[in-house]
């Protein structure tokens, strides 16, 4: 079984069922913590529809949290979620502004994840 993340008629990530459910749950939790909409909506078919504008705002807030703290635990927690989110956002045609000191590492991590994320 799969858990697709779709933007319009395009599948951004055809996640495995457990990977997709876990990612969607983590996004919901982070969005609640950040007090912003996640941009992901559960579909009746068992996946998520992506609202690019809302998702981009969520990813930007998540990155802003990551970039604004020196707490290594908080940065580590945010980084895992951020990498997958950057891949999805890029595939939907969106982007967030990254500080130069973060850009290379985050883009490399997202690129590695993207190779493992079937679309």
Image (spheres, rainbow, N blue to C red):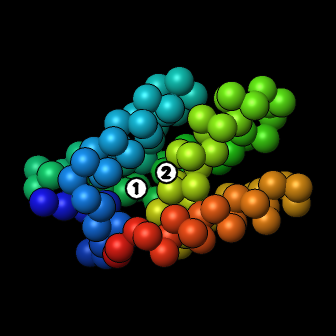
- Can you identify the residue that label 1 sits on? 51
Q: Position of residue 69 (x, y in %)?
A: 80, 30
The residue tagged 2 is 55
Residue 79 position by quadrant: top right
The reply to whether residue 41 is in sight is no
Relative to 31, residue 2 above or below = below
**Residue at image x 52%, y 65%?**
113
Between 33 and 9, the one nearer to me in the picture:
33
Nearer to me, 2 or 53: 2
Taking 77 as reference, is 90 above or below it? below
Question: What's the residue at 88%, 55% (across, down)?
Answer: 101
Residue 104 picture location, percent across and down: 79, 65
Residue at image point 51% right, 56% down: 84
Q: Are marks 2 and 1 in contact (CB under 8 Å)?
A: yes
Instruction: Look at the image and tell me in which quarter the N terminus lies.
Output: bottom left
Q: Position of residue 56 (x, y in %)?
A: 56, 54
| Residue 96 quadrant | bottom right
């Amino acid at each position: 079984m799969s858990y697709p993340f779709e933007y319009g008629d395009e599948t951004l990530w055809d996640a495995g069922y457990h990977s997709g459910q876990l990612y969607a749950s983590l996004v919901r939790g982070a969005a609640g913590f950040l007090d912003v909409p996640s941009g992901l909506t559960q579909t009746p078919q068992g996946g998520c529809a992506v609202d690019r504008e809302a998702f981009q705002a969520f990813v930007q807030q998540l990155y802003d949290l990551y970039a604004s703290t020196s707490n290594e635990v908080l940065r580590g927690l945010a980084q895992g979620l951020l990498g997958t989110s950057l891949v999805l956002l890029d595939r939907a045609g969106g982007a967030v502004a990254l500080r130069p000191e973060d850009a290379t590492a985050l883009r490399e991590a997202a690129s590695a994840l993207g190779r493992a994320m079937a679309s």
